[in-house]
Image (cartoon, rainbow, N blue to C red):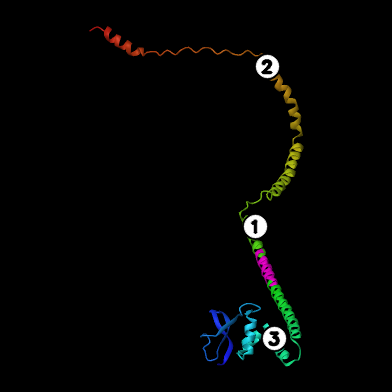
Amino acid sequence: MATKLRLQRRGRKNYPFYQIIVADSRAPRDGKYIERIGSYNPNTHPATITLDFDRALYWLQTGAQPTDTVRNILSDEGVLLKKHLLGGVAKGAFDEAEAEKRFEAWKNSKSQLTQKLIEKDDEKKRTEAKARLDAEKEVNKTRAEALAKMRAEEEAANAPAPVEEEVPAVEETVEVAEPAIEETVEAKAEETPADADEAEGTPVEVKEATAKEEEAPVPVKEEEAPEVKEEPKAEVSSEEASEEKPE
């Protein structure tokens, strides 16, 4: 029976992962299998691989044929290199200790390369996260500036008109009016010098007049006699006269 090392699909839509199985070459892809020796998840970077190293090496030595994808996986894990080194030991090219030494050297270099790849991916993720954070900060800053500007415009629109702007106009009017008042006062002072002299003499005359008024006796008002209403006498006399006439 021809056996193959191949992948069996699992997972869900748009997120597949695979099982590494040993199956009959005539069996369908997702049908029965002989043994499961590992798994492969390509959704991570680097891809996550779990493998039973000894069982994979055993099936390779017994003649199982891997598919292209499984061959690449076995090469990355060192199964093919181990098979090659064991073939050299069987031929007598070197001993088993030398084979193990070479395999460990390759494994260390492989692990260092994988670690560098992981660090590179982590650094890339950090730079992307920092770039996203900086972009978000810039957006927040522009939004804050726009909001502050809008609030300032609203406060300026709702603020009452300043009173200090009207004060200079009032001062100008006062300054303009003062020279006019001074001119009128000077004109009046020039036109009426004689009136001022007459005004100086008036206080003496006013004092004399007030003194005479104080010396003069105060007239006493006579009491008004009550008015007596006179009755009409003419009518009474006419009646008496008619009575006195002889018949």
Q: In terms of depth relative to the viewer, which is nearer, 55 or 209?
A: 55
Q: Amino acid at mark 2?
A: Lys
Say which element carries label 3: helix
Could you tell me how far apart the alpha carbons at marks 1 and 2 are, in whole angstroms?
A: 81 Å
Secondary structure under the numbered disc 1 in the rendered image: helix
Q: Is residue 136 magenta?
A: yes
- The numbered disc on residue 119 is none
The residue wearing badge 2 is 212
Image quarter hosting the N terminus: bottom right
The span picked out in magenta is: 126-140
Q: Earlier in the sequence, mark 1 or mark 2?
A: 1
Alpha-carbon span between mark 3 and mark 1? 75 Å
- Neighbor class of circle 1 (other Cα within 10 Å; few <14, some 14-19, many 20+) is few
Asked if residue 96 is among those painted magenta in the image, a careful observer would answer no
Residue lying at 70% horizontally and 72% vertically, measured from the top left: 127
Q: Main secondary structure of the magenta part?
A: helix
Q: Earlier in the sequence, mark 3 or mark 1?
A: 3
In primary-sequence order, the first of circles 3 and 2 is: 3
Q: Of the numbered discs in the image, which one, if any, rests on residue 82?
A: 3
Q: Residue 201's spot in the image, x, y percent?
A: 75, 25
Number of the label disc, if any, that sits on residue 152: 1
